[in-house]
Image (cartoon, helix red, strand yellow):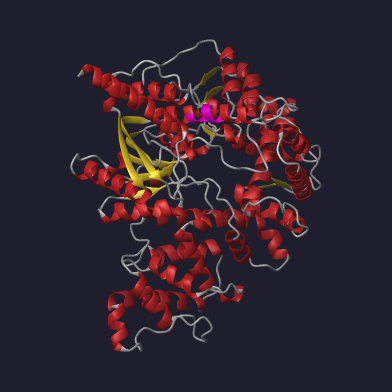
């Protein structure tokens, strides 16, 4: 890219495609360098971004043809969050009619799986009205599940009709409109082939078949093209990625270059990767090279709490005694629960080690910082009639006031919180008897008083939009010294996500809500409290923070950043191997590689899980420079013993190494 720009190629003629926004970060960083020649800007897009940009441009010519009821009005593009908001409006009446009564799943997960079905139909290339037929033809379990598939199909159909009636475009409709109506148009194709003369397509193995089909047709029109394929990739198959279709693009390229030399992992790590994959598939016959002892350390404990303690102790040794930067350490698990995250962060912070977490698929409302902000929003807007209970205020004060402990927070709530008081929910600190003031301490009392005064000042001013309120609250109060968000990167990140989420929701829903005389902020709080799954937010300032990273394994892989040391928690857990429970969708059945009438058997599930684990192990180790700490527990969080395939692979290696070392002696 830099070579083309420095050679005089107009940057605006360069198209850079990535499967997801996070993978575009290196390109964007380079394009923002001040040393680059002045001029236009290269387009760094995903398939969804390319579709949205062209739908906006050619909307008048295709809106009617695509089936939208009001082609004279502009389109409204939905994020994952706003799509969940609108599908909830469509599905709630059906839930009241006892739809999905046999499915035990949170409503937000139910909505996201229906949307995922629509997305799969669009990116794979089959009609969205055939989703249930495909799922039912593969099902061999209890007949009651077939009813759930039919109900999910009806919800998907109703949501699509609602979108067409109101000019709403979720991701699936954006892709479908672009692929079916825009790309075949001579006018659109002429515009695209004229505008973009050079292509760079990053991580094609992580992209969807619709993108591969598009590039297969488009590639001959470019003056130059560079397609990058990571062998052993395809970790986004659960989101529709298709590495097999991606590899077919190889035949469209005139030159093929292959790099087998890793720029990240050491030779012992690479040997360990080969041995561990062979152990997972039970194909490890010959003893691995003794050098792989340098690549991994096994931490075996009895209880889960002991594992957390052992990991934090080892991290402290690495940072304080071996002078390793905290940013070079990642702690990974199949799923990062609230309990696990809280325990690890607290212990590391107590040791003076900076730590951050990354959990992009979680609901924003699940984050403690978000709950704190929502509580403050409710207290500042009593007219919205969201009741606030003492437990929520206590948790909020623990977040807001730096250093406050649970005992003092509970005392403050008992003495100072009056939800129905005429002068506001918080009483003045000064009249409190001296004994209790001393127990609370005047330092915490001063921070409390500043919070109270800020809320009183806000009540005396005209009401502002929710995103403006949150920005002011964070900038004027919470980020200041003495408050809990000061120098807290995680809380700052959650606040930024929440503000951006409100802004996107307001842009989409404001016209409709204003017509119904419903405050936008109130409706957003209602949506958030229902546990809507967060959309993806890019936070560049977090990527380079010098702090230990806690993340789910797949999240770390898709961040595409290496680490010197990795910790794999609870390697015996089946979570490393098992597919997520999704009762209303199926990533393998809803793909191009599955015959529509073929049943999905246990053997198919086993084969798919084995392949996914092998890709996961390979992806993690290719992003590890020096050493992996594999942590195993005899008794997990639920009090049971697990022996998953990852542990079996590790035991195969340990057994053969022990035999090799015994023979050497």
| Residue at 51%, 63% in the rendered image | 468
Q: Which residues are magenta?
A: 608-613
Q: Which is more toward the observer, 595 or 108?
A: 595
Q: Quadrant of residue 149?
A: top right
Camera sees residue 306: yes
Q: Which is more toward the observer, 631 or 335?
A: 631
| Residue at 66%, 54% in the rendered image | 85
Check the image and name the residue furthest to the top.
Answer: 254
| Image spot of residue 482 (x, y percent) | 31, 67
Q: Is residue 513 left or right of residue 578?
A: right
Q: Quadrant of the C terminus?
A: top left
| Residue at 54%, 83% in the rendered image | 420
Q: Which is more toward the observer, 501 or 359?
A: 359
Is 8 colored magenta in this rendering?
no
| Image spot of residue 220 (x, y percent) | 62, 16
Magenta region's main secondary structure? helix
| Image spot of residue 574 (x, y percent) | 49, 38
């Amino acid at each position: 890219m830099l070579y083309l720009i420095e050679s005089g190629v107009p940057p605006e003629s360069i198209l850079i495609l990535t499967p997801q926004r996070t993978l575009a970060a290196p390109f964007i960083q380079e394009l923002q360098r001040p040393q680059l020649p002045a001029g236009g800007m290269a387009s760094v897009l995903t398939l969804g971004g390319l579709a949205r940009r062209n739908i906006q441009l050619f909307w008048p010519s295709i809106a009617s043809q695509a089936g939208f009821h009001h082609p004279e009005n502009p389109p409204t593009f939905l994020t994952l969050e706003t799509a969940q908001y609108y599908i909830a409006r469509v599905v709630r009446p059906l839930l009241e009619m006892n739809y999905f009564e046999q499915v035990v799943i949170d409503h937000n997960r139910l909505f996201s799986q229906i949307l995922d079905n629509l997305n799969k139909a669009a990116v794979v290339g089959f009609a969205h009205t055939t989703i249930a037929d495909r799922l039912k033809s593969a099902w061999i379990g209890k007949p009651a599940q077939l009813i759930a598939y039919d109900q999910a199909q009806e919800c998907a159909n109703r949501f699509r009709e609602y979108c067409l009636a109101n000019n709403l475009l979720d991701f699936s409709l954006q892709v479908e409109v672009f692929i079916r109506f825009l790309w075949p148009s001579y006018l659109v194709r002429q515009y695209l082939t004229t505008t973009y003369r050079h292509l760079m397509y990053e991580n094609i193995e992580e992209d969807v078949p619709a993108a591969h089909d598009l590039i297969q047709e488009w590639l001959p029109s470019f003056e130059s093209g560079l397609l990058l394929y990571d062998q052993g990739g395809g970790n986004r198959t659960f989101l529709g990625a298709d590495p097999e279709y991606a590899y077919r693009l190889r035949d469209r390229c005139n030159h093929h270059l292959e790099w087998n030399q890793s720029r990240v992992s050491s030779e012992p790590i690479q040997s360990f990767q080969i041995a561990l994959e062979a152990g997972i598939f039970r194909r490890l016959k010959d003893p691995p090279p003794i050098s792989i002892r340098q690549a991994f350390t096994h931490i075996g404990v009895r209880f889960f709490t002991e594992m957390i303690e052992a990991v934090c102790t080892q991290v402290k040794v690495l940072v304080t005694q071996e002078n390793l930067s905290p940013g070079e350490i990642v702690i990974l698990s199949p799923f990062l629960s609230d309990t696990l995250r809280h325990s690890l962060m607290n212990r590391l912070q107590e040791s003076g080690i900076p730590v951050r977490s990354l959990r992009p698929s979680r609901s924003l409302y699940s984050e403690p910082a978000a709950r704190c902000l929502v509580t403050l929003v409710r207290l500042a807007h009593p007219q919205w009639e969201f009741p606030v209970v003492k437990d929520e205020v206590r948790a909020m004060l623990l977040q807001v006031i730096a250093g406050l402990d649970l005992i003092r927070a509970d005392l403050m709530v008992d003495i100072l919180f009056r939800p129905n008081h005429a002068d506001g929910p918080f009483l003045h600190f000064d009249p409190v008897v001296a004994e209790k003031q001393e127990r609370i301490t005047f330092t915490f009392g001063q921070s409390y008083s500043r919070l109270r005064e800020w809320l009183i000042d806000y009540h005396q001013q005209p009401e502002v939009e929710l995103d403006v309120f949150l920005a002011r609250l964070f900038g004027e109060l919470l980020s200041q010294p003495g408050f809990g968000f000061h120098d807290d990167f995680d809380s700052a990140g959650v606040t930024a996500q929440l503000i951006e989420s409100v802004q996107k929701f307001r842009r989409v829903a404001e016209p409709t809500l204003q017509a119904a005389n419903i405050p936008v902020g109130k409706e957003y709080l209602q949506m958030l409290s229902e546990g809507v799954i967060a959309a993806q937010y890019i936070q560049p300032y977090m990527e380079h923070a010098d702090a230990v990273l806690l993340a789910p394994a797949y999240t770390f892989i898709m961040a595409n950043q290496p680490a010197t040391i990795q910790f794999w928690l609870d390697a015996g857990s089946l979570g490393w191997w098992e597919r997520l429970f999704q009762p209303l969708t199926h990533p393998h059945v809803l793909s191009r590689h599955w015959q529509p009438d073929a049943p999905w058997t246990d053997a198919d599930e086993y084969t798919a899980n084995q392949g996914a684990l092998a890709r996961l192990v390979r992806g993690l180790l290719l992003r590890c420079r020096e050493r992996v700490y594999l942590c195993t527990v005899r008794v997990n969080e639920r009090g049971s013993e697990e022996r998953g395939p990852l542990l079996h692979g590790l035991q195969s290696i340990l057994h053969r190494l022990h035999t090799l070392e015994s023979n050497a002696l």
